[in-house]
Image: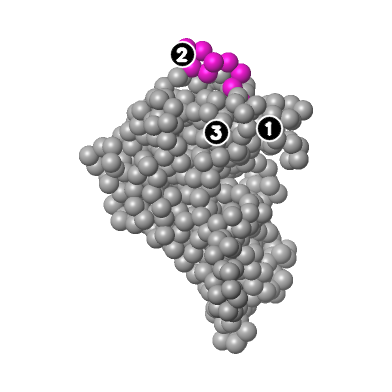
Amino acid sequence: MKTGKDYIGSVQAMKSEVYAFGEKVQSLTDHPCFRPTVNALALTYDLAKEENALATADSPFTEGRVNRFLHICQSPEDLIKRAQFGNFLTPLHGACVGARCAGTAALNALYATTYDMDEKLGTDYHQRFLKFIRYAHEEDLACSGMVTDAKGDRSLSPGKQHDPDLYLHVTQVRDEGIVVRGAKAHQSGAAMAHECVVAPTTTLGPDEEKFAVAFAISPDTPGIIHVAEAPAPNARRFQGDEMDFGNFRYGVHGSTLVIFNDVFIPRERVFMCGEYSYSGTLVHRFASFQRLASAACKAGHCNLLCGAAAVAAEYNGCEKLAHIKEKLTEISFQSTLAFGSAVAAGYMASSTPSGVYVPNTLMVNAAKLQCVKAVWDASRLAADIVGGVVCTAPSAKDFDNPEIGGYVEKYFKGKAEIPTKDRIRIVRLLEYLVGQASIVPTESVHGAGPPATQRLMIRAATNMDYLKRCARVMAGIEE
C-alpha cells in the first residue's frame, strides 16, 4: 500500500485541468485551496500503512490488505468497521476525505448492481467492474464517488430539462466505448483522486436511457475540467498567518464542479449504459452506504467540536459552571445518537445477491437525519460556550504589530496562565468547526442527500400497516 508521501507524489504526476478563483491551477499539491485536502487524504494512506486495524481490511481480490475505503462490504461487521473508521478518522483531520469516502459507497453500490444486471440481462458489466476493483486494490487508488448532477430546474426530470447537459449523459456509443457530456457538481476531492467513479443521481424512466450511465475514469482525462469551490474561508488562505485558519493543515473541503466535455470512456470502464430500470437501485444503494459514512463522520466532527469547546471553556475560566457542563454533555449525547444509529444500520444490514451487505434503510436514514441535527446543535452550543470572540478575534498580524500588539495581547486574554495566542488559536479552530470559517454544517445537511430524501425513505421503510394493526389489536378493535 502507498504511504501519504507516495500518494502526494502520484497526484503531482497527474495533469488535471483545474481552475480556482478564476485562475488555472499549476500545482494541486501546493495550491491553498487544495493542499489541505491533499494532506487529509495522505493521512488515510499513512494510517493504513501503519496497519491501523480500522484503516485496512482483507481484500477479496488480492492476497493482501487493502485500505478500508476500497473495501467491498461483505458482512454487517464490515459496515460497522466502516462506520467506526469514519468516526475515528474525522477528529484527526476535522475536514473532508471525500475523494475516498464517497468512493466506498460508489464501489459497493456498483459491485452489487452490476452483478444484478449481469444475472438478469446477460451483460458483462460485473466482469468489467471486477477487473477495475482489482486494479484499484492492487494500486491502492483514491476513488472519488461522483453522483450529484447540476440538475437545473428541480421541478423537471432529467429528460425534460431545457439543456440536457444539466444531467451527465451519453452522446455517442461506439464499439470501443462511449462519449459523455455534462457535469457532476459539488464533488468532494475529485481533482485529487486517482479515479472518478461516476453513477446516476436519480431514478430514471424509459425515455431517459442516455442518462443511465456509470463508469470510472481518471480526473485528468482530456475533456474533463474542474472548477474549485470558492466559499469565503478559502479566500483567507491566500494571505495571513497559519494561526488565522483554525484548521490550517487539513481544513478545506476541496470540492469541484467536474465538467465532462465530450469525454471518451473506454468500453472496459463502462458499468451501465442505458439500463435505466437499475438506476433507482444503484442510487438507493449508494445513498445507504454514504449516509452510514456521513453519520459516523459527522458524529466524529461533533466529538472534535466538543473537545475544542471544552478547551475554550477552560481558557475562559468557566469550565466548572453547570450550564457549560450541560452543553458539552448535550453535544456528546447528540453525537452518540448519530453514531449509534449508523452502527445499528450496519448491524441490521441485508445481503444482496452479489454478497454485498447494504445498511438497513430505516436506521441509516435516521442516522443521517440525526447527524445533521447533531452538527447544527453542536455548532450553536459551542458558539454559546466560547462567546462572541468566535467572530471578533484579531488576526495574527495584529499581535505582531508593534503599535497595537500589546493591546490585543492584554484585552483578549482569558485565564492569566494561558497565553493569549493559545486562546485565540482554539477560538479559530472553533470558528472553523462551527461553520463560520468552513462549510461543514451546510455540507452535513446536503452531503449524501438533503433531509427531505431521508424523511421520504423513512416513511417508505416504516411498516405503518403493521404498527396500526398492533395498535388495533392492543385496543381490542376487531379486524
Q: Amino acid at mark 3?
A: Ser
Measure the alpha-carbon separation of dots 1 and 3: 15 Å
Magenta-colored segment: predominant secondary structure: strand
Residue 429, quarter of picture: bottom right
> Which residue is outermost to the top?
175
Q: Residue 172: say if magenta.
A: yes
Give the number of the mark in front: 2 or 3.
3
Which residue is found at the position 22% from the left and 39% from the top? 63
Quadrant into which the N terminus falls: top left
Residue 6, position as x, y percentages in the image: 37, 38
Q: Secondary structure at mark 3?
A: helix
Residue at figure coordinates x 48%, y 53% from the top left: 293
The three-letter code of the residue at mark 1 reads Pro
In magenta, the rendered stretch is 169-178
Query: Can you give x and y, in whole percent of width and height, for residue 21 in the image?
Result: 68, 37
- Residue 459 badge: none
What residue is shown with label 1? 158
Q: Which residue is mark 3?
A: 277
Identify the residue at horizontal 52%, vertical 69% (top origin).
Answer: 337
| Residue 23 visible, this orientation | no
5 vs 87, nearest the viewer = 87
Q: Where is 226 relative to 372, above or below? A: above
Amino acid carrying mark 2 in the image: Glu
The tag earlier along the polypeptide, 2 or 3, is 2
Residue on which disc 2 sits: 176
Q: Residue at x 76, y 40 (%)?
A: 155
> Considering only vertical position in the picture, is 320 above or below 342?
below
**Nearer to us in this view, 171 or 255:** 171
Neighbour tally class for label 2: few under 14, some 14-19, many 20 plus, Cα within 10 Å: few
In terms of sequence position, does the residue under pointer 1 or pointer 2 come before the other?
A: 1
Using the image, determine if residue 101 lies above or below residue 325: above
295 over 354 or under it: above or below? below
